[in-house]
Image (cartoon, helix red, strand yellow):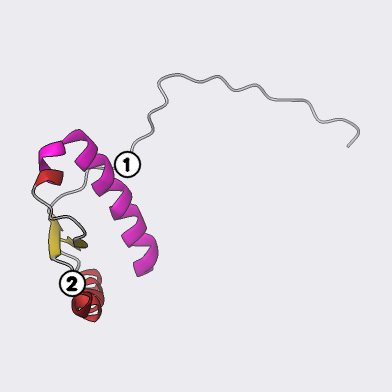
Amino acid sequence: MIPYEQQNTELIKEFNRYVRQHPTIAEQIPDEAIIILQLEGDEAFNARARQLAENRRSEGHPIVFVKIKQLQPLRSRIARLELQQVAQTGA
């Protein structure tokens, strides 16, 4: 199981990419909002995120829940590469 902090960091990166590709989403998020990511099907992650949101509620910022319904598999963006093996010396 991926620790909450690591999983949240990965989801934040994905959400940022998504928003850059779909700028109209950003227009729907109020200024200074606290964004809480929820991952469909991962209740442990979601419960932890909701708990952290409750802890921050008193800050007075709007809270926006973002439910991620599906993630595509991670893929490399490398189109081509070349390997060159270097011979070991004096073993």
Q: Is residue 50 above or below residue 6?
A: below
Query: Which residue is at 27% across, 45% downward?
Result: 16
Tag 1, which secondary structure? loop
Residue 72 picture quarter: top left
Q: CA distance from mark 2 to mark 1?
A: 22 Å
| Mark 2 crowdedness (10 Å alpha carbons): few <14, some 14-19, many ≥20 | few
Query: Which residue is at 24% across, 76% downward?
Result: 56
Q: Main secondary structure of the magenta part?
A: helix
| Residue 82 at x, y percent in the picture | 55, 19
Apparent side of residue 50 relative to residue 78 in the rendered image (left or right): left
What amino acid type is highlighted by mark number 1? Leu
For this rendering, which residue is in front, 88 or 75?
75
Q: How many marks?
A: 2
Residue under label 2, please give it.
Answer: 43
| Residue 54 at x, y percent in the picture | 19, 79
What amino acid type is highlighted by mark number 2? Glu
**Mark 2 vs mark 1: which is more N-terminal?**
2
Residue under label 1, please give it.
Answer: 74
Contact? badges 2 and 1 (CB < 8 Å): no
